[in-house]
Amino acid sequence: MTDQPQRAGFVALIGEPNAGKSTLTNQMVGAKVSIVTHKVQTTRARIRGVAIEGNAQIVFVDTPGLFQPRRRLDRAMVAAAWGGAADADITVLLVEAHRGVTEGVKRILEGLDEIGKGRTVALAINKIDRVKAETLLGLAKDLNDRFDFAETFMISAEKGHGVQALREWLADQLPEGPWLYPEDQIADLPMRMIAAEMTREKLTLRLHQELPYQLTVETENWEERKDGSARVDQVIYVARDGHKGIILGKKGETIKAVSQSARAELEEFMGRKIHLFLQVKVRPNWLDEKERYSEMGLNFKDGNA
């Protein structure tokens, strides 16, 4: 620590689905706290990662991607995203360099006009390695003409380019005040939810197009054992009987592979032995059950049309 005053605050990362918000959160924090897959709309709850930069503690709110909601779950996710932006000290809009100003980005800019008055909003153009320099400069000018951003950053969240400059700027912008979390804490989600997210990520990666968003994972039981290990029981909820067979796979091969992969990552994350047990349950209406939303950290009422 230096003689500089402590700073602490919340930074909301917003953008279209797959813009790189989860990847940037993990890059900033230096650990995997947010689900990262090739599929869009995978982040459901407002996952917070905690990063230390000098005398500042930056709490990242990794929001669901902003898109046109159609189902109850979609509407709840979008409400959570805007809620995260409205509650944060600083908002960072991520835009994919190669996609430019899409209709989705235009809608987000309109939303920022509504909540962004008097707020600090930065622009981060991500995946800069996919386009030429002149394209980047043109995109930056176009976006800054549409909204009064406090600062613009050119980054590659995946490769880490420009991330440190963004983190240092965020640290300087946060309000003075004591840190919000213990120094060694990197996320404010309970381990039960982090573990469920890890399993859901493995399912998403394994199943690809077969079962996009018709499943959720909940940690039903967490039992600490005397030898320092933990038994973790999780339930995978699906909407139809046919989905259960897909997750189980031939002779149970799929669920076995998912379990092994999730367990290995959980053990690495926690630094100890984990005994992970998965079961699949069919709940046709889980997308309309209040309890499922609470487990995901979403507000059930926000899903009302």
Image (cartoon, rainbow, N blue to C red):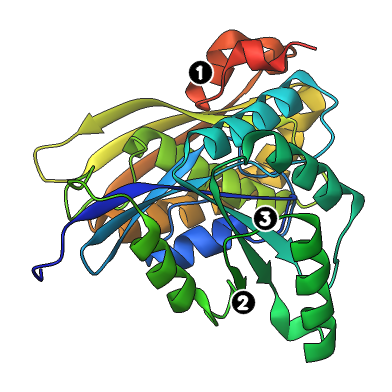
Whether residue 37 is visible, yes or no, is no
Q: Position of residue 128 (x, y in %)?
A: 71, 80
Q: Position of residue 197 (x, y in %)?
A: 51, 42
Residue type marked 1 = Ser
Q: Position of residue 85 (x, y in %)?
A: 56, 39
Asked if residue 300 is positioned above or below residue 9 in the image, the reply reads above
Asked if residue 54 is positioned above or below residue 78 in the image, the reply reads below
Query: Which type of secondary structure does the marked residue at label 3 adopt?
Result: helix
Marks 1,2: beta carbons within 8 A: no
From the image, tell me which residue sits under label 2: 156
From the image, tell me which residue sits under label 1: 294
Judge left or right: residue 231 versus residue 156: left
**Mark 3 or mark 1, whichever is nearer to me:** 1
**In the picture, residue 99 is in which quadrant?**
bottom right
Query: Which type of secondary structure does the marked residue at label 2 adopt?
Result: loop
Residue drawn at point x = 73 percent, y = 62 percent: 95
Q: Nearer the viewer, residue 117 or 46?
A: 117
**Mark 1 or mark 2, whichever is nearer to me:** 2
For marks 3 and 1 on the same chain, the one whose residue lies earlier in the sequence: 3
Judge left or right: residue 183 versus residue 159: left
Judge left or right: residue 160 versus residue 213: left
For marks 3 and 2 on the same chain, the one whose residue lies earlier in the sequence: 2
- Report how many numbered discs are placed on residues in the image: 3
How far apart are labels 3 and 2 at the CA level?
22 Å
Residue type marked 2 = Ser
How far apart are labels 1 and 2 at the CA level?
33 Å
Q: Residue furthest bottom?
A: 133
From the image, tell me which residue sits under label 3: 205
Residue type marked 3 = Leu
